[in-house]
Amino acid sequence: MGIIENGILGTVKNKVGGVVGSNWKGRNTLRAYSKPANPRTAKQILQRDKMGRANIFSKRLVGPIFNVFWDPFLKSISGFNAFMSVNLSKFTETIAYATLVIVEGKLQQLFISSLATDISNNQLTVNWDPSSISDSEWMEKASIVVYNVTDDRFEIFTDVASLGNTQAILDLFSLNLADDIAVYLFWSKTVDGVLTGVSTSTAVVEVVPA
């Protein structure tokens, strides 16, 4: 319902007949009312489905990953929105977990060389080869994000090991036979305790073997 304040010559708020009244930057304005569109073409439905999947996946990464490793290097966009921009196309009905970019940066990438699982102890060992990165950086820290596709659960390990250690042994909440897991590895550089750079994450997706 629209409201006309101070009589017929006063301010119009909300919808009155075929017009909508509002205040924009201190000015009273009127515009023609148009019914909001809600397109349902096949292409638009697919896009909405992608947005839904991406949102469900990524909202749990906002605090520990996007705020920490994306936001410091962005000016006009949030880490969450940057992640969505980079990854949205990959959230099809069959999500391409191995191609997702959990962190994006300019440092040289660090690649996972192998994974080893210990189901009895719920442990995952992540191995990497830092030989392509200068020796002076080997004391910088690696971070790992583990996503259990089967259980839809994240486990995040930031600054878990120095690059020169070449591996990290992670204690997981649970690890079961035939679990489908996606493991994302990246490293970050700090100067006097201030984050100055990150590498774009790399990924390995595996089914836990018998």
Image (cartoon, rainbow, N blue to C red):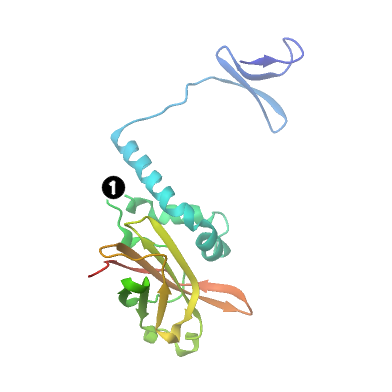
At 73% across and 31% down in the image, what residue appears?
26
Horizontal side of residue 16 vs 44, given as left or right: right
Is residue 15 positioned above or below 135 on the image? above
Secondary structure category for the residue under label 1: loop
- Tell me which corner region of the image, top left, top right, bottom left or bottom right, holds residue 31: top right
At 36% across and 83% down in the image, what residue appears?
129
At 40% across and 44% down in the image, what residue appears?
52
Horizontal side of residue 48 vs 105, given as left or right: left
Horizontal side of residue 72 vs 45, given as left or right: right
Task: Name the residue at the right extreme.
Answer: 6
- Tell me which corner region of the image, top left, top right, bottom left or bottom right, holds residue 199: bottom left
At 74% across and 12% down in the image, what residue appears?
9
Task: Name the residue at the bottom extreme.
Answer: 135
Is residue 140 positioned above or below 209 on the image? below
Front residue of this view, candidates 123 and 108: 123
| CA neighbours of label 1 inside 10 A, class few (<14), some (14 to 19), many (20+) | few
Q: Position of residue 85 (x, y in %)?
A: 43, 53
Is residue 156 positioned above or below 127 on the image? above
Front residue of this view, candidates 127 and 135: 127
Q: Position of residue 169 (x, y in %)?
A: 40, 78
Q: How many marks?
A: 1
Task: Name the residue at the front extreme.
Answer: 120
Horizontal side of residue 49 vs 61, given as left or right: left
Please say whether residue 128 is visible from this viewpoint: yes
Q: Position of residue 134 (x, y in %)?
A: 44, 87
Please say whether residue 103 is visible from this viewpoint: no
Front residue of this view, candidates 26 and 142: 142
Quarter of the image with the C terminus is: bottom left
Is residue 82 positioned above or below 112 on the image? above
Q: Which residue is mark 1?
A: 93
